[in-house]
Every structure is written in C-alpha cells, then in structure tokens.
Image (spheres, coloured by chain):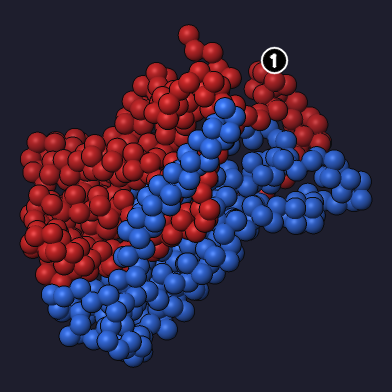
Chain colours: A red, B blue
Amino acid sequence: MECYEGRMRQSCISPIERLREVARSPVERRNLRNGLLFISPWLLGLVAFTLYPICASFYWSFCRFDGFSPPVFVGLDNYKIMLFEDPLFWRALFNTFYMVIFALPITLVFSLLLSILLNMKVRGQPIYRTILYLPSIAPVIAVSVLWLWLLNPEYGLINRLFHFVGINMVGWLIDPKLAKPALIIMGLWQVGGSVLIFLAGLQEVPTHLYEAADVDGAGILTKFWHVTLPMLSPIILFNLIMGIIGYFQYFTQAFVMTQGGPQDATLFYALQLFNRAFLDFELGYASAMAWLLFILILAATIIVLRTSRRWVYYEGETRG
Amino acid sequence: MRRIIIGNMKKRNFIYEVSGHGILLLFSLLFFVPFYWMVMTSLKSDNEIFTLKVKWLPAVFRWNNYKEAILFIPFLRYLVNTLIICFFNVAGAVLSCSLAAYGFSRIRWFGRDILFIVLLSTMMLSGQVTMLPVFRIFRALGWIGTFLPLIVPSFLGSAFFIFLLRQFFMGIPHELSEAAVLDGCTELGIYARVILPLARPALLTVALFTFLWNWNDFMGPLIYLTDNSKYTLAVGLQQFLGQHDTEWSMLMALSTLMTLPVIVLFFLTQKTFVKGIALSGIKG
C-alpha cells in the first residue's frame, strides 16, 4: 500500500478538472482506455460476483425467499426471527464464539511456541520444520476423515493410547462437551501456516537487540518478553485477524465429521447458514445470517485493530 | 578465566542442542503419527483395524486395499474431474490476475487508485454474503451440475492474487517498459514480452496456490456438482464417507491418495511454497 505515486500530483486539482484534463490529452485518454481494458476481466467479475451479489443478498435479507418464487419483502422479520425466535441460531452463535474465544488463542500461543522451537539453531532444523508444516497443507477433507478415525471412540488410535494410561472410552465426537475440544486439538495439528508466518517474523528480529539485552544481563524469559514479543507483535496481530476470519467461517470439518452434532455441539454459524440455505431453502433468512456474520467479523476485526495500538509495536515509530 | 567461559559456553551449547533436539523430536513424532497411522491403516486388514491392540505395523501390507478403493468409487473419474477444474482455474487465475495487476501497476490512468482501493476492500467481504446470489446466477444460466461455476470465476480475477502480482510488477524497473515502447511495443506486447517473463516466480506462486486451493476445495464442488460422475476427489471422498463410514482401510487409502500429490508438490516447489505462505497466510 506504500506506493500511490499518483496521489501527490492529483491532490492539488479537483476530480472534475482532472477528468477534463484526461479528456483533452490523447496520452491520458489512451492510458485510461488501456488501463480499463487490462482490468476489464476483474471489473466484470466485480460487478457479477461481488457488487450484484452484495445488493441482492442485502435485499433478500429483508425478504421471504425460497429461491424459486419471487422474493416477498417482509421488512426486519428475518432478523427478528433470528434474534428472538430461533434457538438454533443462538446455539450456532455460541459455538462459533466458543471457537473464537478458546480455539483461537490456544492455537496462536501453540503456533508461536512451535515457531520459537523451529527457530532454534540446531542441526536438522529443516527436517523438523517440514514435518511440523506438512499437516497444514493436507486437504481438509482428507484430514477430517483421518481424524474421524483417530478420534473413533472404540478403535481410534488416540483412545487406544489413552487406554494405556488408564483413561477409557473418551467419547470425543459423540460427547457434546468434548466435540469442540476435539476439533480444537485437530486444529493444533494444522497450525503450520501460522507457524511459518511467525517463523518468518522471528528471523527478521535484529540480533543486535538480543546482544544488547545480553549485555544488560537479561535472561531468556526477559528477552522473550521485552524483545521477541514486541518485535513479533505486528505478526501476532496479522495471525489474530486471519484467525478471527477463519474461525467465524469454520465449516468443512464440522460438515464432514459431525454434521453439527452431537446435540448441536458443533453446529457452527457457517454450517447453520448452509443448512438454512441449501436444506431449508430459506434464502432470505440465510442472507440475513450472512450479513450478520459479515458485521460480526468486521466488528471483531475493528475491535482488535483498535486495541492493537496499545500492544502492537511498529519499528521506526515513536510511541506517545 | 577465559577458558572457563569458553568451557561454560560449550556446555551451554551442548545443553541447548540436546534439549532442542529432544523437544523438536517429541513434537515431530506427535505431528508425524497421524500421517503414519493413516498410511498403516490403509494397508491393514479389517481384523487388524477393529482390534483393541495398537498395531503399529500390519502383519501383511495389503496393497490390494488401494486397488479395491480405487475400483470401489470411480476414483479415476474423480481424479480427472479434479484435474480439469484445477487446470482451468490455474490458467484462468494466472491470465486474468496478471492482466489486472498490469493495469493496476504499469499504466497510470485516471481512477486507478480508487478502483484499487475497491479491489482491496473486496478482500474483506466474507464469502457467505455473496455465495447465495452467485449460486442463483449460475442456476439462471443453467450451469448447476457442470464444471462452469467452478471454472469461470477464475477467469475474472481474484483480488488477493491481483494484489500480490501488482506488488511484484511495481518492483520491475520502468526503464524496461520505456525501452520496449521505443522498440514499438504496445501495452499488450510489454505485458506479454517484458513483464510476464520477469514475473515468473510470482506467477508460479499464483499457479501453485490456485491449484492447491482447487484440489482441496470442498464447498464449491459440494454446492455446484449434483451428478456423481462430475464429483471431484474431495466431494467423492465425503460421499464415500457418508455411505461406508466403517470401511476405514479404504477411507484411509483414499485420504492417502488425495494427500500424497500435495506433499509431492510441496517438495518439488518448496521455495515458492514457503515464500507464498509467508506472503499470504493462506491456510488449507
């Protein structure tokens, strides 16, 4: 975002004058035409797959609409039903917040710790990095099937191993209390992506900062707290926001592994939205859910960005 | 005195190495075991699968499980379908995103920066908002049950890849374009003969991630493909799970077959891969 060369030049005249200038100059006209031609595929996509859908789903969210007969305007009914009459909606919202509030911090701390381990100067580090990274690129569907098997209450490897230490028959995906924790554990296996991003950040931390801390006699924990964490904070922020977006839209694993069960314990927002749209054909209601989801994600992101001023440290910036 | 310090450092380094390897080995083992278990289960007989003992190795490696699994579902059909979708998506994404990125970086035109901000803001929109109307568009076109809804959008650009390529194109010196103009090149000529060859690493990143994304994609094929003969591997595997959720050897064989190409691709393109992830934070 750093390069807006055009802005300085344009800012001194009004857009209308600028437009006249463009219309007069053959070079400017040609550039405008060429520029628009080059981006025309994207422009077409923008209109067909973004702008029109935004308007349509916004309108539908105020309609009763089954996708076949024309939409009937019903005002705020969908939103009212959603907020006051639909227990499944609140269930899905609760489950999704559960993931954002528990799974996300756990996953972030875990991936930060892994990245610190993978940043140690030991021989064979590339091999460790590869092994810890690979699970994250495996197709989510294959991973879901695999973990369904690992978590199988009777014959699954995890319960078989638990058996050795005297814990018997943990009903991972059949116990409403354990279903979400089971999904969180599965998610920990796939943190490779954010680990890699943390790792890239760790390698950017200038060594002279650690050397200076050494001179001051700082221990490992002090260095971690006062050097590593502040230097890494922009990347923590990035991973946090990516995590928020991801967990609010958590879908495939639940769809494949539990279909929302047991007792709606893994009925997440995106899954409920999918069911409303493609099983119940309530496109109006589903559109209302989609808009609320978007607002929730946006609000969470803005809150995080607001608070980030207090804890994110950008190099070369003096803090007031 | 000095010798003592050096001795201490050596000792500390030794402890560092040993404890480092210890913890890393432990985690590597934990992360590796699920894959190992997947492959081993795929090679076991049902007797060995449904047992209360932990059998780390099958008595006999039943490679036949793979043959059975491939024949049980139209695996080849699914594979070909997936590859067709992947191929057109890669072609579409590389073409449309590089064109748009060129327009956003190498030509200066009125309104460019505003449209670029529009592009960036579309990245914030969550997919659920647009999903239903887009579905309706494709239904109105009569494309449900065909590959078209899964292919055509890639030819109309993707905000993230356009952004990524634009950043790369910005770094290519303008003198090269100017020299090409003097040689009588049109903008399209500069794009094709100057910029694209220089942008190969970035284009490779786009191609790689488009391929992976489509190989792994589940939601798209789930919504748009209605006919068994059109399924991709992802949907095929999920359907198989729904119908035969106790055929663990076959399920593990299919999961292995679906994961293997991704891992091979990772080892072939490790550098592009790692750089791309670090750039983007794309997961799965």
Residue lying at 57% horizontally and 59% vertically, measured from the top left:
B270
Give percent across and percent down for residue A300. 31, 31
Name which residue lies at 46% across and 30% down: A228
Q: Amino acid at mark 1?
A: Cys
Check the image and report above or below for B274 versus A11: below
**Residue A51: percent from left, percent from top:** 44, 43
**Residue occupied by mark 1:** A12
Q: Residue furthest right?
A: B183
Under circle 1, the secondary element is loop
Q: Nearer the viewer, residue A250 or B33?
A: B33
Q: Nearer the viewer, residue B159 or B40?
A: B40
How many residues crowd mark 1 within 10 Å: few (<14), some (14–19), many (20+)? few
Q: Residue at x 33, y 87 (%)?
A: B61
User: Is the N terminus of chain A in the top left, top right, bottom left or bottom right quadrant?
Assistant: top right
Quadrant of the image occupied by residue B125: top left
Position of residue A119 relative to residue A187, above or below, is above
x and y, in percent, of residue B37 in the image: 30, 71
The number of numbered badges drawn on the structure is 1
Q: Position of residue B183 (x, y in %)?
A: 92, 50
Q: Is residue B234 above or below residue A98?
A: below
Read off the chain for label 1.
A
Task: Give the image quarter of residue A34.
Answer: top right
Residue B243 at least partly seen: no
Is residue B214 shown to the viewer in this render? yes
| Foreground of the two, B91 or B246 | B246
